[in-house]
Amino acid sequence: MTENPLHKFFQAKSMAIFGASVSKDKPGFVIAENFINNFNGKTILVNPKGGEILGHPVFKSLEEVEDTVEAAIIIVPAKYVPAAMEDCAKKGVKSVTIISGGFKEIGEEGIKLQQRIDTIAKEHDIRIIGPNCIGLFYPKRGLDMVFLPEEKLKRPTEGGISILSQSGAFGSAFLDVMGSLGKGNYLSKFISFGNASDINEADILEYFGEDPETKVILIYLEGFKNGRKFIETARKVSLKKPIIAIKANRTEAGAQAVASHTASLAANDDVTDALFKEAGIIRAYTWDDLFDCMKAFNSTLLPNGNQVIVITDGGGAGVMASDAIGMLGLELADLSPEIEKKMKEDLPPYFSVANPIDLTGSATAKEYLYALEQTINDPAVDAITYIIIPTPPAINVKELMDGLKPYAKTINKTVTFCAIGGEEAAYIREELEQMNFPFFPTPARAVYAIDKLAEYADYLRTHGQKLPVIREIPK
C-alpha cells in the first residue's frame, strides 16, 4: 500500500522555516517561536538577512545548511515563493507547506504564480499543502504552524479529534474554542489546506481515516477539488470513524464570497446533501451544529435506538426537550414497568415519573443522581437528556457534580447534559467538561446531539457494523 504523503509532513524530523522573522508582530516570528519552543525535531530558520532569532541561527538559504532537511514552511511574500521552492528543490526537501497568500484567490497574476510553484513541485517530486493556509498543528510533536500567538489563541492538547479546514480563520477559531474547554484534551491533528494546489480534502480525509490517533473527523469545506474521490473515501472512512462536516457556500451570496477566499469550486447544495448522507457524513450547517457534534461524538456512546428519556427539575425545560425530540424524529421513551414502579415507590409522590421525568424545584442532588442511575439501568431507554436548573434552594450543585464523577468512568449509555442559568450553570458546565461529559447550553441542543449520534449509529447498523460499547476516556 502506498504511503499517504501527509505522513511525511506530520513525522518530519527537521523543518525549515522560510521567512522566519525577528519582528514579534509578524507571522514569521510566531511560527519560529512555536517550533523553537515546542517542536521535537530540528528547527532550521531561513531568511536572506541572516542573524539569529531567540538564540537560534538564521541561514540565508538552505545551501548553508549541512544537515538533511525533510520539510519546509514558506511564509514569505507571494512573489518570493518560487525562489523558496527552488531552494527546497536543491536541498531535496519533499514536503512543503505554503502559508503565504496572493495566489489563485486574487486573480490572474496569482494564478500564474501558483502555476509556477506547481511546476517546480512536479519537476522535483515535492508535495504541497496550501498555498494561502495556516498549515498544520500536531500537539503530540509540537508541530505548530499556526501564526497566531498563544496569548491570542489557546492551543488544545492531545485528544482524538482531527480537523481539516479550507478556511484558516474558521479552523483557528475552532482550535481556540477547543483549547478553552475543560482540560483542552481534544486535538489529534489539524490541517488548513487553503487553495489546495496539490494535497486536497480527499487526500487529507484518506489520511485521517488511516490514522490510528484520529477517532473523530471534523471538516469545514467551501468547495471540492476532487469531489468524486472525497465521497468515495468518505464511504470507507465513515464505517470506521465519524465524519462531521460543514459544507459552506450553500447560496449565491456564499459562492461570491468563496470566489475571493480560496478560489474553490462550488457544488449544488442538494447534491452535496444527498452525497453526504449516502457516504455516512454527518452534515452540520452552523458553527453551533459542528461544536455540538464535536462534543457529543468525543464524549459519549452511540445509542442503540431512538428512545430518549428526559430528566429535569423544570417542567418548561422538559417540554422544550420533548418538542425537540418530536421534531427531530426521535421518540420519548417509556420506562420499563419495573423501573417505573420502583421510581414511584422511592421518590416523593409529587415528582412526575412519566417522560419527561420532572423532579420539580424540590429536587435534591441525591434524587437527581437516583433518577440517572435508574434510567441508565433501564434497557427500554437508549439515551438520556439530563437537564439541570440549579436555582432552586434544595439542590446542592457541588454535591451533584461530586456524585456524577464516578459515572464518568462507568457510564454505559448515551447521555447529554444541559444546565440553564448563570453562575452555577457555568460551574456545572466546567465540572462536566472536566469529566468529559457532553454539555450543551439549551435543551434543544442537548437533544440535537443525541439525534446526530443516532443518525450515525443507524448508518453503521445499516452497513453491518457493530457499535462501540466502551466510552473512551481521554487522558
Image (cartoon, rainbow, N blue to C red):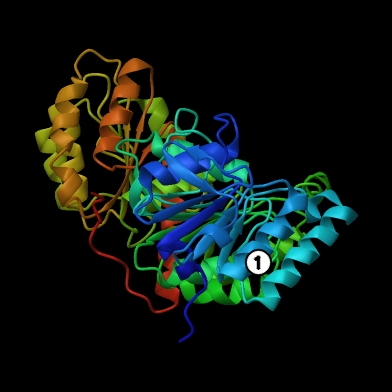
What is the x, y in percent for residue 65?
50, 59
Res 210 seen here:
yes
Is 144 left, or right, of 96 in this rendering?
A: left
- Residue drawn at (21%, 19%), measured in percent from left and top? 362
Is 380 left, or right, of 421 in this rendering?
A: left
Measured along the vertical axis of the image, is residue 154 above or below residue 244? above
- Residue drawn at (77%, 59%), measured in percent from left and top? 266
Q: Secondary structure at mark 1?
A: helix
- Residue drawn at (57%, 41%), measured in percent from left and top? 28
Q: Quadrant of residue 204?
A: bottom right
Res 348 seen here:
no
Which sits in the foreground, 56 or 440? 56
- Residue drawn at (23%, 52%), measured in percent from left and top? 473
What is the x, y in percent for residue 16?
52, 55
Is 23 left, or right, of 475 in this rendering?
A: right
Q: Amino acid at mark 1?
A: Ala
Picture quarter with the N terminus: bottom left
User: Most extreme residue toward the bottom, as rendered?
Assistant: 1
What is the x, y in percent for residue 304?
32, 62
Which sits in the foreground, 329 or 43? 43
Write down the residue under mark 1.
274
What is the x, y in percent for residue 180?
39, 33
Which sits in the foreground, 472 or 224? 224
Q: Quadrant of residue 88?
A: bottom right
CA neighbours of label 1 inside 10 A, class few (<14), some (14 to 19), many (20+) = few
